[in-house]
Image: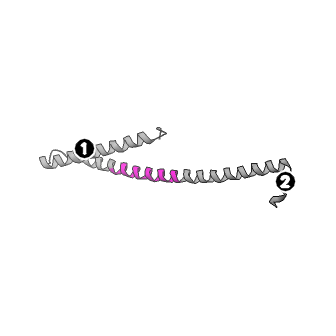
C-alpha cells in the first residue's frame, strides 16, 4: 500500500506524522513513568529502613538514659557512656542524611 501513498492528501500525511509522533511520546512517557515508579519504590523502601533505624536508636537511647548511674562500676559506666555516644552519633548521622536529601523539610 506504500506505493500508493502519493495518492493521499497532504493533510492525511501530516495527520499520520502527528499520530506517529504521539505514539512515540506515549511510549516514552510510559518509560518515564516506569522509572519514576522505580525511584518512588526505592525511596519508600529506604525511608522505611531509616524510620526503623531511628526507632531503634530512640529506644536504645531511652534505655541508656533510664539506667542508674550511681550503682555502676567505672567500667560499666564507660561502656554505657560509649554506647550512648555511639547512639547519639549514629542518630545525628541519620538525621543529617535525611535533612540533606529531603526536598520537603516539613515532613
On screen, residue 84 versus residue 45, left or right, reads left
Q: Residue at x 70, y 53 (%)?
A: 23
Magenta extent: 38-56
33 or 89, which is in the foreground? 33
Q: Which of 32 and 9 is in front in this view?
A: 9
Q: How far apart are marks 2 and 1 (CA)?
A: 80 Å
Callout 2: SS: helix
Labels 2 and 1 touching (C-beta < 8 A):
no
User: Does the stretch in magenta take in 39?
Assistant: yes
Q: In which quarter of the image is residue 101?
A: top left
Residue that protrudes farthest toward the front in the picture: 3
Mark carried by residue 67:
none
Residue 31: give x, y in percent of width and height. Answer: 60, 53
Specify the farthest residue to the bottom. Answer: 1
Q: How crowded is mark 2: few (under 14 residues within 10 Å), some or many (20 or more)?
A: few
Marker disc for residue 6: 2
Residue 2 in percent (x, y) is at: 80, 59
Q: Mark 1 points at which residue?
A: 85
Amino acid at each position: 500500500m506504500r506505493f500508493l501513498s502519493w495518492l493521499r492528501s497532504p493533510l492525511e500525511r501530516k495527520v499520520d506524522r502527528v499520530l506517529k509522533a504521539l505514539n512515540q511520546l506515549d511510549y516514552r512517557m510510559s518509560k518515564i513513568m516506569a522509572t519514576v515508579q522505580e525511584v518512588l519504590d526505592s525511596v519508600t523502601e529506604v525511608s522505611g529502613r531509616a524510620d526503623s533505624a531511628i526507632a531503634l536508636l530512640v529506644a536504645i537511647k531511652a534505655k541508656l538514659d533510664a539506667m542508674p548511674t550511681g550503682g555502676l562500676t567505672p567500667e560499666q559506666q564507660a561502656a554505657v557512656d560509649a554506647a550512648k555516644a555511639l547512639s547519639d552519633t549514629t542518630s545525628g548521622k541519620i538525621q543529617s542524611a535525611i535533612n540533606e536529601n529531603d526536598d520537603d523539610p516539613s515532613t
